[in-house]
Amino acid sequence: MRVFKFGGSSLCDAEAIGRVIDILQEKSIEEKPLCVVVSAMGGVTDEIIRTAKAASHREIAYRETLKALRKRHTKVLNAIAHGDRETTEIIQEQCVEFFGICDGVYALGELSGKVLDRLMSFGELCSAHMVAAACRHAGLDAKFVDSRDYIVTDERYGAARVDFEKTAAALHKLDADGATIHVLPGFVARSANGRITTLGRNGSDYSAAIIGAGLGASAVEIWTDVNGVMTANPRYVSDAESIERMSYVEAMELSHFGAHVLHAPTLQPVMEKTIPLLVRNTFSPDFKGTIVGNESVSERIITGISTVDNVSFIRVQGSGMVGVFGVAGRLFTSLAKAEVNLIMISQGSSEHSICFAVQDADNQKAVQAIETEFELEMQAHMMDTPVVEREMCVLAVVGENMRRRPGIAANVFGSLGESGVNVVAIAQGSSELNISMVILQQDASKALNAIHSAFFKK
């Protein structure tokens, strides 16, 4: 069995869905059965969130948005399956339920995470029903399968945690089903108590990986709108290239540092079962894309460069930190309690300061947590008020071939120096897989192009 996942850009309109059906017709000849996991149509989830928030703010215009969503789905269904009667009725039922919930949100002026998860499931459910209908219209043996009956989670709405043991047991029932193609909605799941949950943004990729791992798939293929994982963000680096093959660990590092094609949660299930993960382009299906597996076969020194944009760099310093046990523990515990995610950490051997990067949106929360935790030390002038540098980015250079090879850091920082890019902080783990640094956001494009030229134009 092979699992395919098609993202929102691959399902944005009737023409795009037609390409998906062409791919499935070809793949169903090569291997059976297939599991097809789909996202909502491009832009639908964002529109649902805006609509739900408008209803909670008592903005009556939300009704017009709901009508537009229904019209868009009906129009596409008519084009791809000539108004398949059964599916049309299902879509209409989904719309009625969706309208009713939004009306309730409007009446109460309140939107809970539980209700928002239920509303956000609408896009994927409709998309899966429509793709299944389009497959059948093209003569394929396809059926809609509700992934909420198989993926079991807790009730952490918005980003539910998967119970892999219960999920694997449930997926065995799906494996025994005789259909050639199963079409499942991504992103959505259900708690053990039967409540609808979602797996967080990019949860459809995660759904595909969970299903692939649970079924012991031969491969999981992520179909999107780019030619695989790129050596750098093509928005910044015009001559960025597709990476033919990379390891799970390299992919994990790049995903953490802003490579939007892959996401860390997606990699974990397939990595544990050593299932190959392929990244392919729906709009260029003959291009091989990227294969993620156990090992990288690239002869290049580095595999890719990535950035996390729009971060704040926070420095905590003071003479009272030197030689004092537990300062770092207290610092990071206070940030964890405040639900602040740390992107990068840097500390010199003097112990006089600890620096770390967070998303811009979290910088005030981080400062408040630190000031509360170290209030007495700051009053005694043993520690300074945290210093925040905004409009920064974290750049990461990743590659397994960097290990035990001298001169890599010199080449990286030499190319940045020649380009006039100042490095604010540096971090490198003992694995030698990743060199990370903080630079000004305005220097991101210049830095990426400088390093890319140094390593990929030889």
Image (spheres, helix red, strand yellow):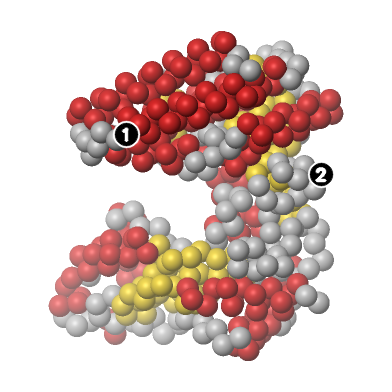
> Is 167 located above or below residue 11 in the figure?
above
Image: 229 above or below 184 = below
Q: Assign the C terminus to one quadrant of the image.
A: bottom right
The residue carrying mark 1 is 62
* Residue 379 percent across, percent down from the top left: 15, 78
Quadrant, the N terminus = top right
**Of residues 207 and 63, the one drawn nearer to the viewer in this rendering:** 63
Q: Which mark is residue 427?
A: none
> Which corner quadrant of the image does residue 70 belong to?
top left
Callout count? 2
Work out how far the residue at label 1 is from the one at label 2, CA to CA, in angstroms: 42 Å
Q: Identify the residue at horizontal 60%, vertical 68% (top origin).
A: 236
Mark number for residue 286?
2
Give the structural element (helix, strand or loop) at label 2.
loop
- In this view, which residue lies farthest toward the right? 30
Whether residue 73 is visible: yes
Check disc 1 and report its element: helix, strand or loop: helix
Q: Residue at x 74, y 62 (%)?
A: 241
In-image side of 280 versus 379 (left or right)? right
User: Residue 56's quadrant in the figure?
Assistant: top left
Residue 273 at x, y percent in the picture: 68, 39
Q: Nearer the viewer, residue 136 or 399?
A: 136
Left or right: residue 256 versus residue 153 is right
Mark 2 residue type:
Asp
The structure residue drawn at horizontal position 42% and vertical position 67%, both measured from the top left corner, is 311
Residue 153 horizontal/vertical position (percent)? 45, 30
> Label 1 is placed on what type of residue?
Tyr
Tell me if 298 is positioned left or right of 83 in this view: right
The residue at 69%/73% (across/down) is: 452
